[in-house]
Image: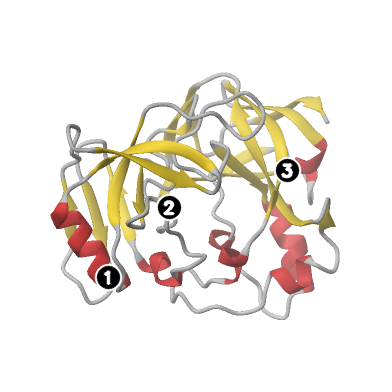
Amino acid sequence: MAPRLTELAVYPFKSAAGTPLRTAELLATGLRYDREFMLVSPGGRFLSQRDHAEMALLRPSYDGEELAVEAPGRASFVHKPVADGPVLDVLVHRSECQGVDQGDEAAGWFSEFLGADCRLVRFTGSRATSRGGGEVAFADGYPLLLISAESLADLNSRLDAPLPMNRFRPNLVVEGLGAYGEDRVRLLRIGGTVIEMVKSCARCVITTTDQETAERGREPLRTLASYRMIDRGLRFGVNAVPRTTGPLSLGDPVEIVEEA
């Protein structure tokens, strides 16, 4: 089978559920609207499923005009983004950046959901990728995460119960590269765009969180530790930086431009 793009997902709200797409616009910062919103503690530190597994149950949708979030047992939160609110200094891991505070109503809704004080912020300003000379919004360090469908199939062949791809929260899923073929590529053309594979992705406890129930287990980290420990991290998928921009669609051809 000729390699092709089989899944697209955007995560407009950091650490909430993803939104599957059939088409998307690839920008320098990743897919349009990716990680544009984020919850922060009163001290400005980002909040994620690492500490609040229940964030997996937040189901956002965002069209650039209105953010809507569904959550079990709660009335929907519908919000028109605030552009002129206070600009807060916030922290994503060790990376300092800024976000526009989205107001007390948003803070109250999410604080009640989490049972912890927090503020909703929208990305503003600029932020460099951890490596690779790219740009990023509130993603951990890179604008894109790509995984080969065959990589998940190989992992699932080692597990007692298979896991869905959403455990790993990729933006792009491709078929036809073979298991861990993404590790062996430096430049990849997808449709009319080119991305550079910059760094294999070290996986954390979020992968053990069921994205439908927010329940945690031991997999896949236990199994990944048996065969994917690379450079002191459990690696699955590759972080990438766009080198050209443009539209993406499911079924787009995928071509290796340069091997790693």
Left or right: residue 87 versus residue 257 is left
Please state which amino acid type lies under the numbered disc 2. Answer: Arg
Q: Residue at x 83, y 31 (%)?
A: 260
Residue position marked by numbered label 1 in the rendering: 113
Q: Who is closer to the viewer here, 247 or 224? A: 224
Check contact, mark 3 vs mark 1: CB within 8 A: no
Lower position in the chain sequence, tag 1 or tag 2: 2
Quarter holding the N terminus is: top right
Q: Who is closer to the viewer here, 156 or 6? A: 156
Check contact, mark 1 vs mark 2: CB within 8 A: no
Residue position marked by numbered label 2 in the rendering: 45
| Disc 1/disc 2 C-alpha distance (Å) | 18 Å
How many C-alpha atoms fall within 10 Å of the one at disc 2: few (<14), some, or many (≥20)? some
**251 lies above or below 57:** above
Residue position marked by numbered label 3 in the rendering: 176
Please state which amino acid type lies under the numbered disc 1. Answer: Phe
Lower position in the chain sequence, tag 2 or tag 3: 2
Please state which amino acid type lies under the numbered disc 3. Answer: Gly
Lower position in the chain sequence, tag 3 or tag 1: 1
Q: Secondary structure at mark 1?
A: helix
Q: Residue at x 61, y 30 (%)?
A: 241
Q: Residue at x 30, y 59 (%)?
A: 118
**199 lies above or below 161:** above
| Disc 3/disc 1 C-alpha distance (Å) | 41 Å
